[in-house]
Amino acid sequence: MKKSTMMLLTLMSVMMFSCKDKDLYDPNAVKPGEEQKVANTFDFSTVQDVMLTVDYSAFNTHGPVFFSIYHENPFVGEGEDEHLDENIKPIYEDYTDKSGRFNQTVELPAYAKHLYVVTGNFFVTERLMETDVQNGGAKATAKSAGTRAASRAVTRRGAQTNDVSKMPQLSFNVDDNGNKIGERVYQDWQTPLGTWDDRSGAPSYLIDKSKVDQELIFSDEDMEGLYATVSQVLNANKACRKTYRDHEDLVLDKASEVTITMLGGSTCWNSSLGYYYYEVGKEPTDTKDLNIIMLFPNTQDGNWARFDSRKNDYNGNIGVNRGDAIQLMYYPNIADGDLSVVSNVFPANTKIGFILKSHGWGMQGEDYVIKGFAENDRKYNVWGASTPGLSYCKVPAGFENKKSPYQYPNPDGDSRSAKFAYKTVDGGKYAIVSFEDACNDEDYDDVIFALKPINAFKPLPEIESDRVVTEGVYAFEDLWPAQGDYDMNDVVVDFKHEREMTRNNTTENFKTIYQTFYLTTYQNYVTLVSGLALKLNTKKKPTSIVMKKIASGSDDEETVTFENDGSIYYLTNDVKAELGTTYILELFYKDGVGKDDLASVEPFIFRKEANDQEWEVHIPYEVPTAKMDFSYFGKGDDASKVSDNIFFVRSGNYPFAFYLAGVNIDAFKDTILLRANESKMIDKLYPDFLDWSLSKGTEKEQWYLSPAR
């Protein structure tokens, strides 16, 4: 190259970079008649369309299954200590149809080549599946191993008993030899309902469903509805919502008979379940005030099969079958030790509480100790009461500062139960109660039961809609179409899309009722003034659209009205003046929409110009709005071909803007957003960026995880 040409190019480069210090970009600084620019065909996309198939139909799921997709294994720990790492976020979440099948095209981050499919569904024991993305598709099919539990009918029978002396932890703490120590924790549990098998713990006083009022037992249709509700509320991989956990004990609205039906459990432990009751306004404040009546000496249903290596932990010692029912009895003089007066009807305004003693059955005498649990019986010394303030979870010496397996100690005696309602199609409501049996998680699916009759109890929390979230980051250069410094920090937007889903009673599948888009602004040092806007693409008209924002430094949402022109919403005219603000667009669909009818957004930066025209920058290949001043295209560093509908592209290996799917702003807070890194080209901060760009996205897809040292 001739020296004069080099000097000219250098001068032009200096002129274009100096525009950064101007308040306005002068499009006339770049003269027409340049040599033909060939656009880079790489669209810098970080998303891929994948035909995703997830199939849990080998299990009787009793309805849709919620699942999450990860690009790395989210489970850490082993055996009982295995749990989801909360720092690893899913890249996609959704529900299957009612048969347990999902088969749709979804948008995943381009880097996701090996997928981890995870569910915490109560009925699916195959919690983790793995699959690869190949030829635009990925398929994961669960294979049921069937129940690994022996039926209670084939468990070795023992003698009938109602002796609780072999279960010392029902009333006391015990030492390593099983001897009672310390003060009494509870009064001795009462056993007026009858006897049980002293090997399995199977009660002799189960309801004979052929001889009882059908209003007191659940039909097959009821059971399906109850199980569908359990699947929607309880997820073995997530903490149960506090809305359900903070609710008071069940309160009878009217005098009524009450039955309890065991729905099952997701635990290897053999625990004991009892009930107690008291008048409204006379809530117990001390555990020794409870008069507990034994319900199920052994709550193990034999369906737990989370870890293959521990599948026989309960040693075939199964005390209940799912669907077993017991009628609760009312003893008005129980507080005086008098059980001679009994009624099958509880008075109105009676509160009914429940208590779960973890490993209560596992702490029997020498002949009945479940193998391998003698240590656990004492290590996890847990009393789970449904009444707040009466539960107990002791963290043993040496484990105080360990997150796992003692992640959730319970020093304040918080309730270890959740309570929520199953709502029938015609509006009737049943009560469901679930328990957490340890201090090591908060999924509350270890023992679950329902109560009848219908509408007997004061209102319980109704099922909250589920939310699924996808995240990403937009980055824009504000000197377009001139050559910029490509530090990609002039306007940075942390993007979140949240879907709120609810079950449709007609189809029994899930639909989206709310779509909410959150855009939070960041930037490094800039002198130019740019605004942030978005184009809203809708396939089905929302019932309503609500606009909100959260000002920088505030946690409160404020309802606002964004300037809009049809589908274009102008969130702010000056990003810098409102830096750190979160802009929110909330779409509501009264009847819900399926995935194919979901709305999408296209964020972009803009500056308003004369004659109602705009300067805009979008991500590569995205179409500008109708207000765009098209005279900018083809000038400077821009290689757009308007006639071919190709916009915002250039010939080099740096984009004017990009969108990174599956990440959040934390990935850039210590790099492009640091003031010291202003004007540093992005590949200087991320050495893998050019490899990713030159390979057209086939290599170093996670370049942003490897900043320069």
Image: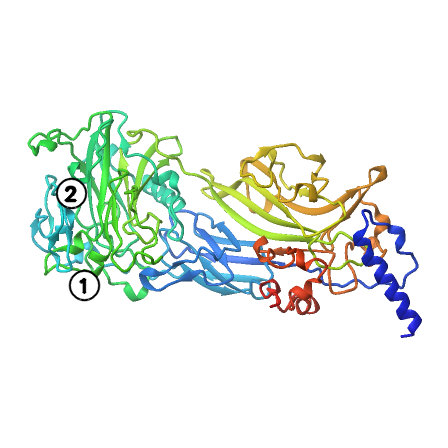
Image coords of residue 4 (percent x, y)? 93, 70
Dot in front, 1 or 2: 2
**Residue at x 39% of width, y 51% of height:** 121
Q: Is residue 216 visible?
A: yes
Q: Earlier in the sequence, mark 1 or mark 2?
A: 2
- Image height check: is 162 above or below 402? above
Residue 326 left/right relative to 631: left
Snapshot quadrant of residue 400: bottom left
Q: Which residue is mark 1?
A: 371
Q: Is residue 480 visible?
A: no
Q: Residues within 10 Å of mark 1 (few under 14, many from 20)?
A: few
Image coords of residue 260 (percent x, y)? 23, 39
User: Which numbered dot is residue 282?
Assistant: none
- Image height check: is 685 above or below 627? below
Snapshot quadrant of residue 482: bottom right
Amino acid type of the residue tagged 1 in the rendering: Lys
Work out how far the residue at label 1 is from the one at label 2, CA to CA, in angstroms. Answer: 26 Å
- In the orientation shown, which residue stands out farthest toward the front? 676
Q: Nearer the viewer, residue 504 or 560?
A: 560
**Residue at x 41% of width, y 47% of height:** 63
Kindly indicate whether the residue at mark 2 contacts the one at mark 1 (C-beta within 8 angstroms).
Answer: no
Amino acid type of the residue tagged 2 in the rendering: Tyr
Residue 69 left/right relative to 223: right
- Where is the C terminus found, in terms of image quarters? bottom right
Image coords of residue 440 (percent x, y)? 32, 54
- Where is the N terminus found, in terms of image quarters? bottom right
Snapshot quadrant of residue 323: top left
Image coords of residue 39 (percent x, y)? 79, 62
Q: Which residue is mark 2?
A: 186
